[in-house]
Amino acid sequence: MFSNFKSIWLTVFGGAIFFVGFVVWGLFPVNIQNSSTEGIIINSGAGVSDIAAILHKDGIIRSPLIFKIIAFLTNKADRLRPGQYTLEGHLSYADIINILVLGGDEEVTIKVPEGA
């Protein structure tokens, strides 16, 4: 009986340590000393999962899951805006989410008629 309880307790404790470690690892920027900037484009209609995938692919965030969790917990997942963004590699998840809520540079298409 006692060994069964001990096994369960160790499993729960080990899982909690793993989860906390994953969250702490995910909260740090990809490269703290990275001062370079990345240009990204978020298309209209892109959801939080799409945006997280773009940021992860471009090396701006470590974990799409952590990005989505923070976006949902801060109630900003539905407020991320499309546009062109220039993001620095040392930004935190909260900084990136706040930038995406404010909106990026809008793309403007200009058509010039022939002969004008």
Image (cartoon, rainbow, N blue to C red):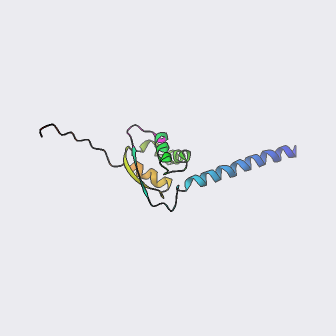
> Image point 82% across, 48% down: which residue?
6
Out of 59 and 12, give the one closest to the viewer: 59
The correct choice, above or below, for 37 with respect to 15 in the image is: below
Q: Residue furthest front?
A: 115
Give the x, y percent position of residue 82: 38, 43
Give the x, y percent position of residue 54: 46, 44
Q: Is residue 10 left or right of residue 48?
A: right
Q: Is residue 116 left or right of residue 82?
A: left
Q: Is residue 66 left or right of residue 39?
A: right
> Image point 78% across, 48% down: which residue?
9
Q: Residue furthest right?
A: 1
> Image point 75% across, 46% down: which residue?
11
Out of 95 and 83, give the one closest to the viewer: 83
The correct choice, above or below, for 88 with respect to 57 in the image is: below
On-image quarter of the C terminus: top left
Magenta part of the chain:
42-48
Give the x, y percent position of residue 27: 55, 54
On-image quarter of the N terminus: top right
Q: Residue furthest left?
A: 115
- Residue 44 part of the magenta-drawn span: yes
The correct choice, above or below, for 97 with respect to 47 in the image is: below
> Image point 73% across, 50% down: which residue?
14
Out of 66 and 3, give the one closest to the viewer: 66
**How many marks overall?**
0
Dominant SS type (magenta): loop
Give the x, y percent position of residue 69: 54, 45
- Residue 53 part of the magenta-drawn span: no
